[in-house]
Image (tube, grey):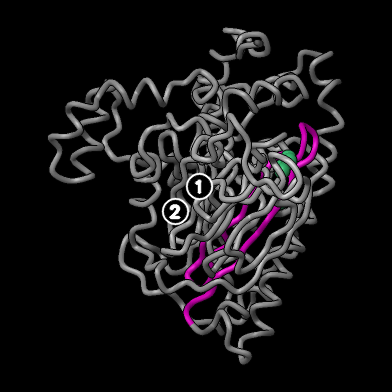
Amino acid sequence: MTELRDFVSDREVEALFRPTARAEGLPARAFGAEFYRLEQERLFPRAWCAVGVASRIPEAGDAMPVDLAGWPLMLVRQRDGSVAAFHNVCRHRGMRLLSEPCRGRSTLRCPWHSWTYDLAGRLVATPDLGGDRVKTAEGFDNAELGLKGVRLAQWHDYLFVNIDGKAPAFADYIRPFDEFVAGYDLSVMRHAGHWEGAYPSNWKIAVEGAIEDYHLPWGHPELMQGVAVRNGRVDVGEDCFAAISGRFEYPAGQGPKIARLMAAMPRMPMTPPAEPDRYFIINLFPVGLIALRADTVMLGLMTPDGHDRTRLVFDHYFVGEAATDPAHAQHRQEMMDNLRFVAEQDIPFNKGVQSNLATRDRLDFPTRFSPYWEGAIHHFQKLVVETLRGDARQKAKRPAAKRSAAKTPAEGARRRAAALGAKRAPAHRRVRAKKPAKRR
Ligand code: FES
Ligand SMILES: [Fe+2]
């Protein structure tokens, strides 16, 4: 079995963990096929990974297959309203049980030899197992042959799995992000639709392209029409998320179409420190991608489809009835189309970086980060390394005793930070808050 150090030398790790302005990015080897195999074994099973949204399986017996970096899984709505996750592998001879989403089933039947499981994954039928019309056979105990379950958690509509079952508690993973968005009343958001796409690049190249707004003036000039001030910012949460955000300011009466669309939509209730006019793009490590604005939320996935391709699944939400009201149908569609347009504008950049990977390694060519705009990418790359080293797991073990004595989450965070010898107290921190960048 390969290790992180087979791909990334100690010197390269040291260079990555320097302050952003002097740091060097992960070498191109970390974006190739062999490194992806390492991630399949050591990164995706260890982490809490977003894999889908609950609104897509609303009723008991609804189920959908999902793939997490080559791990075939299925999400199944239970009779009690909860969602369960299973490995999408039949206990007979390993056939993929579910190949398409389905609705309202009472059981899940394998198409090959018809072994049948109930919604909780118990094996309930094995027709002809012991001969023609003989349902049982010596040596078979159905109780031992249920589907293999996967640890699952839900945050608003997002569903997360932890394949190896050993990640720290989900509440601990999500806490920095939960605190970060505490000013937004996300409970009013309703599902409106989804779309899927793909990037011809490694999943990390896809995520990195999404969490920097450095390239907006050149990659997405339409977004910048009439923008007087960009006011960019980076926020990160340990072991959890990396966010960019901006607050565009336009001269009166100017601004792109998207700004006018936004003005017509209802906004979610907000309390400080939420900022009504700031948009956020957030990587919920490793594959979650959230777009957050006062009027709309997108819960997305950037999941590897092999080492050199990334699957995009973007689910969109609006405030209350604005998610379904025909009066807002055109606004909703234009907003989703706009995000899709922007995502597709990034295809050539993803392709261009992917196609240069081999050359970069031949030239031993380190990449660099803008300290102003690219702190989120830097944090993301460090989380890749830390997850492969198993750092989060070690940290979770050490301060456990102190955590139980904390009276509030904030106090818990302070104590954890103190126990780790870290300097920062809150669970998330602002990497940069400089004067707004004036545009000419
Ligand atoms: S592999 Fe599923 S029933 Fe045979
Ligand atoms: Fe982009």
Residue 308 appears at what percent x and percent y? 80, 34
Left or right of 55? Residue 345 is: right
Residue range corresponding to the magenta coloring:
292-320
Q: Circle 1 — which element?
A: strand
Q: Nearer the viewer, residue 423 or 414?
A: 414
Q: Is residue 298 magenta?
A: yes
The quarter of the displayed image where residue 330 is located: bottom right
Tell me the residue at 66%/39% (across/down). Answer: 89
Q: What residue type is labelled 1?
A: Phe
Q: Can residue 429 be seen in this view?
A: no
Residue denoted by label 1: 160
Tell me the residue at 74%/65% (across/down). Answer: 222
Q: Does the residue labelled 1 lie within 8 Å of ligand 2?
A: no
Look at the image and tell me in which quarter the C terminus lies: bottom right
What separation in Å lies between label 2 and label 1 (alpha carbons)? 6 Å
Q: Circle 2 — which element?
A: strand
Marks 2 and 1 close (CB-CB < 8 Å) = yes
Tell me the residue at 49%/61% (across/down). Answer: 157
Left or right of 437? Residue 308 is: right
Q: Residues within 10 Å of mark 1 (few under 14, many from 20)?
A: many
Residue 20 appears at what percent x and percent y? 53, 28
| Chain-order first, disc 2 or disc 1 | 2
Residue denoted by label 2: 154
The quarter of the displayed image where residue 103 is located: bottom right
Left or right of 173? Residue 264 is: right
Q: Which amino acid does label 2 sit on?
A: Gln
Question: Which dot marks residue 110?
Answer: none
**On screen, residue 23 above or below 237:** above
